Amino acid sequence: MPGRVSVLGLGLLGASVGAAARARGARVAGFDRAAEHARLALELGHVDDVHPDAKTAVAEAELVVLATPVAVMPEVLAEAAAGVSPGALITDVGSVKGPLAAVLPGLLPSGVSYVGSHPMVGGHRGGPGHASATLFDGATVVVTGADAPPTDGVAGFWGALGARIERRSPREHDREVAWTSHLPHVLAFAFSGAFRDAPESAKRLIGAGFRDFTRIARSDPSLWAGILLANADALADPLERSAAALRELAEALRSADGAKLETILAKAREGLQDTPES
């Protein structure tokens, strides 16, 4: 665990990083453009202090964690770069890695390394008020990077927070999370948008299945618009395959082909083998 950690962005993930690092002995400096987030993170004890700008927040930090939305990470890092200490490590919590790996290293001074990270955690309730020092206990964190010492250092940080580490290249990461994270969000958002046309009385017939399926569609629209746009290329194939699966289901229903429908559903269930149920 680094002795001094800086977190830039104090929403759910950033504040949880701060809280978890503090619980393990690190001193944590924080910054957030939203004054209310910064105030609340400090009040709740997720960070030791907050700073008015990114440059002063990273002074003397051994590890800097970018926890802003993906779209503004380059801008925030550019603001912070002049204050980063030589030898510091930079990582992030963004759910898209390719675009960040292409841009962020070029913003850093000599002797400072960037290693991408993606904690596979979160929720539709954002902000520091929902942060937790135990958020990363047992969670999967993907770490990307080619240089062994910096990559090992970032992996060691997440491991100290209780996470299970998976290593991928940025391209591999983006292709895989397009299936496991981004496509489910797209489908949940699409259904929830279509649900606006359902009879008003249908809202009185909602059960656990509906709630489970639509929970992620309650996520921040501006955050997810940025994520999906950043990974649009990797999402193309999963979207096409899902559209084909829906067309096949629709055809079986139109033709009242019960045997075909059961086969489709059975194959779908088989596709979930070796995946966790909850």
Image (spheres, rainbow, N blue to C red):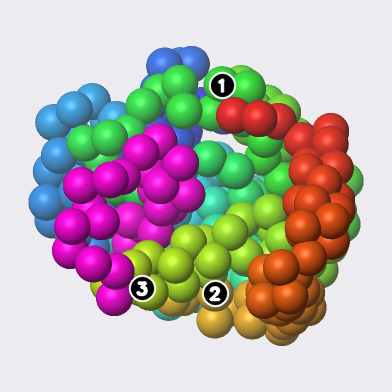
* Viewer-proximal residue among 205 and 122: 205
Magenta span includes 200: yes
C-alpha gap between disc 1 and disc 3? 34 Å
Q: Magenta segment range? A: 197-223
C-alpha gap between disc 2 and disc 3? 16 Å
- Is the stretch drawn in magenta largely helix, strand or loop? helix
Q: Secondary structure at mark 1?
A: loop
Name the residue tied to disc 3. Answer: 193
Q: Tell me the tag on residue 239.
A: none
Q: Position of residue 58 (x, y in %)?
A: 41, 51
Q: Three-letter amino acid code at disc 1?
A: Asp
Between disc 1 and disc 3, the foreground one is: 3
**Mark 2 Cα-neighbour bin, 10 Å: few <14, some 14–19, many ≥20:** some
Q: Is residue 164 left or right of residue 57?
A: right
State the residue at coordinates (72%, 61%).
Answer: 179
* Viewer-proximal residue among 84 and 189: 189
The quadrant in which the N terminus is found is top right
Q: Earlier in the sequence, mark 1 or mark 2?
A: 1
The quadrant in which the C terminus is found is top right
Q: Tell me the tag on residue 228.
A: 2
Regarding residue 202, the answer to whether it shows in the image is yes
Q: Tell me the tag on residue 137.
A: 1
Above or below residue 140? Residue 66 is: below
Regarding residue 105, the answer to whether it shows in the image is no
State the residue at coordinates (65%, 50%).
Answer: 117
Q: Three-letter amino acid code at disc 3?
A: Gly
Between disc 1 and disc 2, the foreground one is: 2
Q: Position of residue 170 (x, y in %)?
A: 78, 64
